[in-house]
Image: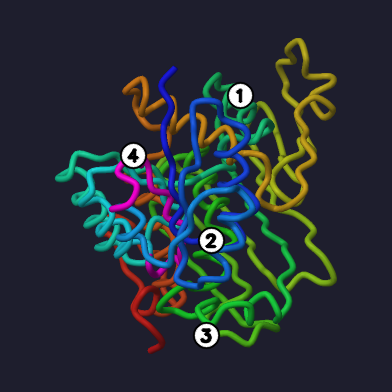
Amino acid sequence: MKKLNFALVGCGRIADTKHAPILANEIKEANLVAVCDIKLNRAEELGKKYNVPYYTGYHEMAKKHPEIDVFNVLTESGNHAAHTIDLSRYGKHIVVEKPIALKINDADKMIDSCRKNKCRLFVVKQNRYNYPISKLKEAIKQKRFGKIFLATVRVRWCRHQDYYDMDEWRGTWKMDGGVFSQQASHHLDLLEWLVGETESVFARSTNAFAKIEAEDTGIVSLKFKNGTLGLIEATTATRPTNIEGSISILGSRGTAEVGGFAANEMRVWQFEDKEQGDEDALIRYKTSPPSVYGFGHAQYLKDVVDAIINKKKAFVDGNEGRKALRLIHAIYKSIETRKEVFLNNDPESSRLGRGQK
């Protein structure tokens, strides 16, 4: 059985809670062979935890481990582009956490560099794998909703100041952005993946509690190319704890809502044309993840392995990651200009990925 050798670039929270344990213990066709982080204590702690070599630089790691097949880039969002482009020169495949980058031009450079170096680029969008989300997508494909006229996302999460103070880059325009580019980015991706391409947005934001450069709270009105209207409400200022990360779909022949704090629980599932299984959907289409990351990372990484080994099309590649970034930039540009922004010409924020203005 062929196995793929993975190395982690960045040993922060997502590496420790998701990528490392999944690659080391849950995927039989994968091996975790090395980790690195510019902070020695982080690299050492994770390396010793999984009994693999650890480094403070990815070039040293790459040279000492030519057996690496895939680099997982888990560094700060503002460094995704530079690290991915640099690593692609080794000809190894790349998995990068969301968002793909902070600037659209950087995302294009990442996609182009991986193509030139004949390696594949995968962008983590694990919430697409949530069981209730999969069922929602299936119902949309089957046209059970009839004409979808309204879609709504709500991200009501709690991040206290100590979360932002954990690392100096959090909440900065140059390296991170705010709730739209980070905490709600998965939900923005789900909205377009389920409903279709966005035509225009109008957005507002504020900073309720967090002492950061970017926003902790915002709302967006959307119009999709197919005529559907959309709403996004996103905040990290919910107190005292997380409430929900939810999405609702309303159509002429049915309504569904996936709620829970990680889009993990079917809350509403009702259609004019009933089918077998609808009556217990609220029980069956439900998971109970331990954190807002959900359970999707394991299935996502399994699909990455399957796509590479069996030369299949990637479920979420660089181009898919670029779509979500494009919507994020349109939202920020609307906030900055206080105008409706159309997505037909790749609108870009003057701040995200560039610094405070």
Of badges 2 and 1, nearer the viewer stands 2
Query: Which quarter of the picture shows residue 165?
Result: bottom right
Q: Is residue 60 magenta?
A: no
Q: Which mark is residue 54?
A: none
| Residue corresponding to mark 1 | 139
- Name which of mark 3 and mark 1 comes first in the sequence: 1
- Name which of mark 4 and mark 1 comes first in the sequence: 4
| Residue corresponding to mark 2 | 11
What x and y, as percent, mark residue 240? 85, 71
Tell me if residue 244 comes above or below residue 26 in the rendering.
below
Of badges 3 and 2, nearer the viewer stands 2
Instruction: Examine the rendering and report whether any part of residue 223 can be seen.
Output: no
Tell me if residue 305 comes above or below residue 75 in the rendering.
above
- Name which of mark 2 and mark 1 comes first in the sequence: 2
Q: Nearer the viewer, residue 193 or 275?
A: 193
Q: Residues under labels 4 and 1: Cα distance?
A: 43 Å
Q: Which residues are magenta?
A: 63-79
- In screen coordinates, is 342 left or right of 242? left
Q: Quadrant of the N terminus?
A: top left
**Mark 1 Cα-neighbour bin, 10 Å: few <14, some 14–19, many ≥20:** some
